[in-house]
Image (cartoon, helix red, strand yellow):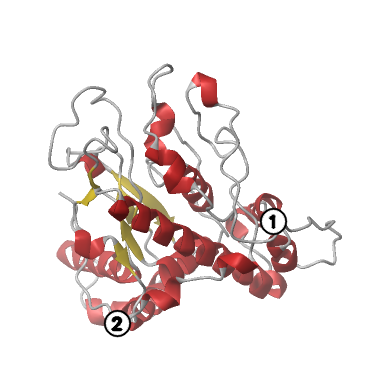
Amino acid sequence: MIVHPVGSQDGSQKARQTACSQIGLIMGRTARELGGGLPASDRDRPLPTALNGPPMTRLPSPIMTSWSARYRAGECFAVWDELRAYGSTGVPEALYGDAEEVARETMSRVAANIDLVVERLADAGYAFAFPEYVCQPPTADDRRAITQAEQSIGPLPLALRACMEIVGGVDLCGDGGAVLPHVSYHFDPGEDADLYPDPLVLMPGRHLWSVWRSRLEGLVDEGACPDPAQEAGSGSRSAVIDFVLAPDEIHKANVSGGEQRIRLPDRSADPELWSVPRRKGVTLVEYLRTSLSWGGFPGYDDLPAGVPWPEILEELRRDLVMF
């Protein structure tokens, strides 16, 4: 069973919307390029073309052009490749604001894409396992928790912080029925039960603080931290924690499994996501790209050749904005 952190929700959907019509660039790479692999007959099919904005011209990449300007001009993949190249040392301080702007723009697009996917799933009769947690826009409590956690744990990756501050919590676990027959939480999925579609799940910001508090309580039990309240406010950064961003693909099917984790503290722009089967070394942004290129169910890229994939996947990913 997936355990969600409890917290108030004072945000509105407006906070997680972005003007897609002003972005105009769409998920136009093939699924293979995004880390997926459609059935043999469809592997080179491009993702659907967006109809919600004018085409944008890709600009050249002179050294003096900002990352954020290049990103908005369409160089989504190239910009993130450059940000990742700084590795664990992180983006230089002089360039941090520009990189942060890229991360926030990225997650604004992710949030808008997720809103579309959720709306389409609901229209198709998809039965969400936890309706109250499907979309959890970030609240003031989440933002405070993120700040508190960073002060105590140390640096958070740009992509992770922006994801928690803009996207918030997401849970697409549920029962797909005839529409998504391989997706199941409360029932046996039947044939092809060895396929785990890996519905998108993201924990909200308050979960990060909860994880850190649990870590401190563990240190108290071990005698290494006599006063967790003092430690939490001291800016101590001696501990390394594994932040559970989501259950793994097996646990999302309500079967005992593991967790998708990010190790903190981490100065990198785009952190590695650990314990994601078949995607060793995948980063958070890369995983989100793969997930949304499959309509929020990236495990479908493991569907055996010759087995038809559900038609609704095309509808779920239609017109999604490139990020």
The kind of residue on which mark 2 rests is Asp
The kind of residue on which mark 1 rests is Val
Q: Is residue 37 above or below residue 321?
A: above
Secondary structure of the residue carrying numbered label 1: helix
Q: Which residue is mark 1?
A: 79
Q: Quadrant of residue 189?
A: top left
Q: Which residue is mark 2?
A: 10
Q: In this image, 245 relative to 79: left or right?
A: left
Q: Nearer the viewer, residue 224 or 180?
A: 180
Q: Quadrant of residue 309?
A: top left
Find the distance from the CA under tag 1 to the CA under tag 2. Answer: 33 Å
In the rendering, at what x and y percent does residue 6 appear? 19, 70
Q: Is residue 198 above or below residue 302?
A: below
Residue pictured at 38% horizontal, 20% vertical: 307
Residue pictured at 22% horizontal, 66% vertical: 5
Secondary structure of the residue carrying numbered label 2: loop
